[in-house]
Amino acid sequence: MGSITIRATERIARAVSERDEGFTTFFRSEYPSLVRSLFLVVHDRELARDIAQDAFIQLFARWRRISQYDRPEAWVRRVGIRMAVRAAARERVRPRLERELD
């Protein structure tokens, strides 16, 4: 029984490693492009990087399913753009709210 558990544990560890390796490869290839796209929305390089990281965190949580999509890069781009649009809207409203508070 013990050797079966060890073999199962090894298979699980290999599967996780392969998943992580696939995600890492995807992240390295898509992250720079996503940051550039998000920068066009938010006009702030650091904010674009933060949003891209948040989008990839969401992707990682769903990687097993989304990695099977024809274009997983479209999924992460859509998530990132939606987050960037919300962040840009918040930044547009902020000066008005600050004036109202003064």
Image: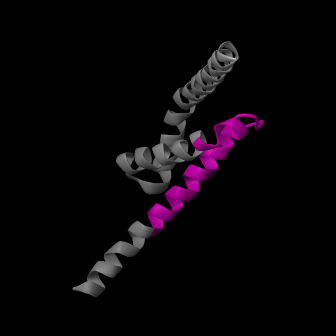
List x then y, in percent, for residue 29. Answer: 56, 27
Q: Quadrant of the C terminus?
A: bottom left
Q: Residue 84 vs residue 79: left or right? A: left
- Residue at the image position 78 percent from the left and 36 percent from the top: 70
The region drawn magenta spans: 61-89
12 or 33: nearer the viewer = 12
- Residue at the image position 57 percent from the left and 33 percent from the top: 30
67 or 50: nearer the viewer = 67
Q: Residue 101 vs residue 18: left or right? A: left
- Residue at the image position 33 percent from the left and 80 percent from the top: 97
Q: Is residue 50 above or below residue 17?
A: below
Q: Residue 46 vs residue 21: left or right? A: left
List x then y, in percent, for residue 75. Answer: 67, 45
Q: Write down the quadrant of residue 24 in the picture.
A: top right
Q: Is residue 44 magenta?
A: no
Residue ranking furthest to the top: 3
Q: Residue 3 vs residue 53: left or right? A: right
Residue ranking furthest to the left: 102
List x then y, in percent, for residue 88. Answer: 45, 63
Q: Write down the quadrant of residue 21 in the picture.
A: top right
Q: Is residue 44 above or below residue 85?
A: above
